[in-house]
Image (tube, rainbow, N blue to C red):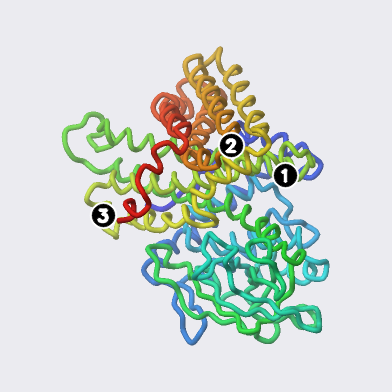
């Protein structure tokens, strides 16, 4: 069955979880009313369903390939990209001063989700450009912004992010790429980067690479990393893509999934580039793009979860097997119903967490209130990790719902699982996200987390008269999370925090998901679909948080009973 963008679910979350009315009430987003949001979402849905979704199987069966040093993209990708670029979708959240629509990120995030649900390998391309637009907007010189931003926003040019090297994966500080100053203020970049998503294509006039490199006199580690903009083609005097730069694609990675997305090894042989931000402060500038991508990757995986659960539900609604009542299909079987409800409830919860994160970023941008920035920072690793884990779990469950047919490639169920698996590794593994949460994001003494938990408990109190049983469980879960947060803040041993970081993040996500479902149930009323999903999530999935918190509070105890040599033997 074809992908269907869940616009009604999006609008419900914007109104009842993200408090979109408050975003639209700000001066910055005064033109982005809920009616405007609805029109944008319906138009993006048509594009996703009619133009992008047909690329899903094309990209898998006919992967991107390298011919004579140039990437040839999968059939249909170039035409779909033109439709996305000409529709203004690349720069929908970008500054109108450079040609963007200036729409809220909360809205743009949902558009990205539906495009990823239609075809993840394609949607990765505009996502990378959107992150580069953010980085250049905040850190580049006026001259760089004037040349690059209008062309990136229009989609004429594409952007990439170049961090990883063969010897420097998550340990970015071990990179070896060098940048030597030139007399004209530019730099000569030399080195090789691997795993570069959409490092080249055959439909954009130029590919603009943000490359981490080290100056000749730079200190070791991440303190000595600078960021450079290195275009495939050097801009001429009018800012148009001119002569080629010393940038080549040395090879394409052979991947488990996302075959339509070329993942390149990029070689820089004295390529001309320009510094973005201050010397030796490249990681701060690059984190602007990475944080944008972390939220984006989390929402991409939610899009895959949505597509996987749609496919599974369609199959369960027509597959007849065994003795069942009602329709006579497997959708009547209790265990299949459990899986279908889990898939739908998890997808909506992960989507809600990402939308809450994007809404906090919108409110910070519109008001400048640092509390909103702190909330967005807290939610970013949760949105990334929970979204990607949901994408993996839901796509895996989708294969199970199909039974033996799920293991057959022609059904399409396995492609979702293969494609989404890498999202838990992208933009910092989920373990890194969890350690970021318990270290950097709790470094304020847990104040940002405490304010969020206050809001969750307040929401439970508001819901208590209409939904007493569900509200009670959400309130209790928030209190348990608060106690564990305080325990983590009090730990002096970082290994105590790191050992329990992943289960703590998962528990936080569980509570946030329950909070979102409770708000949806309260708004929709008893007997509604949101109420049924909330009842399922809070009664059956939320209780997992207690075990996760117990795991988190165990700290490093038992983690080092085996010597490393015995562990890896």
Disc 2 target residue: 492
Check the image and name the residue furthest to the top: 465
Q: Is residue 148 left or right of residue 411?
A: right
Q: Is residue 387 left or right of residue 378?
A: left
Q: What residue is at 48 percent from the left and 70 percent from the top?
A: 262
Q: Position of residue 435 (x, y in %)?
A: 54, 45
Q: Residues within 10 Å of mark 1 (few under 14, many from 20)?
A: many
Q: What residue is at 47 percent from the left and 56 percent from the top?
A: 425
Assign a secondary structure to mark 2: loop
Disc 3 target residue: 407
| Nearer the camera: disc 3 or disc 2 | 2
The disc, 3 or 1, on the residue closer to the chain's N-terminal end is 1
Residue 274 sits in quarter: bottom right
Q: Position of residue 205 (x, y in %)?
A: 64, 77
Looking at the image, which is closer to me, 103 or 434? 434
Compared to 336, does 66 lie above or below?
below
Determine contact: label 3, label 2, CB under 8 Å. Answer: no
Q: Position of residue 75 (x, y in %)?
A: 45, 72
Q: Which mark is residue 321?
A: none
- Viewport quadrant of the C terminus: bottom left
Compared to 308, does 547 lie above or below?
above
Q: Residues within 10 Å of mark 2 (few under 14, many from 20)?
A: few
Q: Position of residue 126 (x, y in %)?
A: 59, 62
Residue 321 sits in quarter: top left
């Amino acid at each position: 069955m074809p992908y269907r963008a869940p616009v009604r679910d999006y609008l419900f979350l914007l109104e009842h979880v993200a408090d979109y009315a408050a975003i639209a009430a700000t001066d910055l987003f005064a033109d982005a009313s809920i009616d405007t949001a609805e029109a944008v979402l319906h138009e993006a849905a048509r594009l996703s369903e009619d133009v992008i979704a047909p690329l899903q199987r094309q990209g898998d069966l006919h992967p991107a390939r390298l011919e004579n040093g140039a990437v040839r993209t999968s059939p249909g990708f170039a035409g779909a990209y033109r439709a996305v670029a000409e529709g203004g979708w690349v720069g929908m959240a970008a500054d109108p001063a450079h040609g963007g629509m200036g729409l809220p990120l909360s809205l743009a995030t949902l558009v990205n989700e539906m495009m990823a649900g239609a075809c993840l390998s394609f949607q990765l391309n505009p996502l990378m450009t959107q992150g580069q637009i953010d980085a250049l907007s905040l850190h580049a010189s006026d001259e760089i912004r004037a040349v690059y931003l209008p062309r990136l926003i229009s989609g004429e040019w594409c952007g990439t992010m170049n961090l990883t090297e063969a010897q420097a994966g998550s340990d970015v500080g071990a990179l070896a790429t060098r940048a030597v100053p030139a007399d004209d203020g530019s730099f000569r970049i030399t080195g090789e980067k691997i795993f570069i998503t959409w490092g080249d294509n055959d439909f954009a006039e130029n590919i603009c690479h943000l490359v981490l490199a080290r100056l000749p006199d730079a200190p070791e580690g991440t303190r000595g990393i600078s960021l450079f903009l290195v275009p495939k083609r050097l801009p001429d005097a009018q800012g148009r893509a001119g002569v080629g730069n010393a940038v080549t694609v040395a090879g394409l990675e052979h991947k488990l999934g996302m075959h339509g997305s070329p993942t390149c090894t990029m070689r820089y042989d004295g390529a001309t580039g320009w510094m973005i931000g201050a010397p030796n402060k490249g990681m701060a500038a690059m984190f602007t793009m990475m944080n944008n991508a972390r939220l984006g990757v989390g929402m991409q995986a939610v899009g895959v979860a949505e597509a996987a659960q749609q496919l599974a539900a369609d199959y369960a609604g027509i597959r007849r097997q065994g003795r069942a009542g009602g329709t006579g299909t497997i959708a009547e079987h209790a265990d299949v119903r459990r899986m279908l409800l889990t898939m739908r409830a998890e997808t909506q919860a992960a989507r809600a967490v990402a939308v809450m994160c994007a809404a906090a970023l919108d409110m910070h941008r519109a008001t400048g209130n640092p509390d909103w920035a702190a909330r967005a920072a807290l939610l970013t690793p949760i949105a990334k990790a929970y979204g990607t884990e949901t994408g993996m779990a839901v796509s895996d469950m989708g294969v199970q719902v199909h039974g033996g047919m799920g293991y057959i490639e022609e059904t399409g169920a396995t492609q979702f699982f293969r494609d989404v698996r890498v999202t838990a590794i992208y933009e910092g593994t989920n373990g890194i996200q969890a350690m970021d949460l318990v270290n950097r994001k709790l470094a304020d003494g847990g104040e940002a987390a405490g304010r969020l938990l206050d809001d969750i408990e307040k929401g439970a109190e508001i819901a208590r008269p209409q939904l007493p049983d569900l509200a009670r469980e959400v309130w209790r879960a928030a209190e348990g999370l608060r106690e564990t947060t305080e325990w983590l803040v009090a730990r002096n041993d970082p290994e105590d925090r790191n050992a329990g970081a992943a289960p703590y993040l998962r528990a936080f996500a569980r509570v946030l998901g329950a909070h979102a479902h409770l708000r949806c149930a309260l708004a929709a009323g008893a007997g509604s679909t949101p109420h049924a999903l909330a009842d399922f999530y809070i009664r059956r999935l939320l209780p997992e948080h207690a075990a996760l918190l117990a795991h988190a509070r165990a700290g490093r105890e038992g983690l080092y009973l085996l010597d490393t040599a015995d562990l890896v033997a």
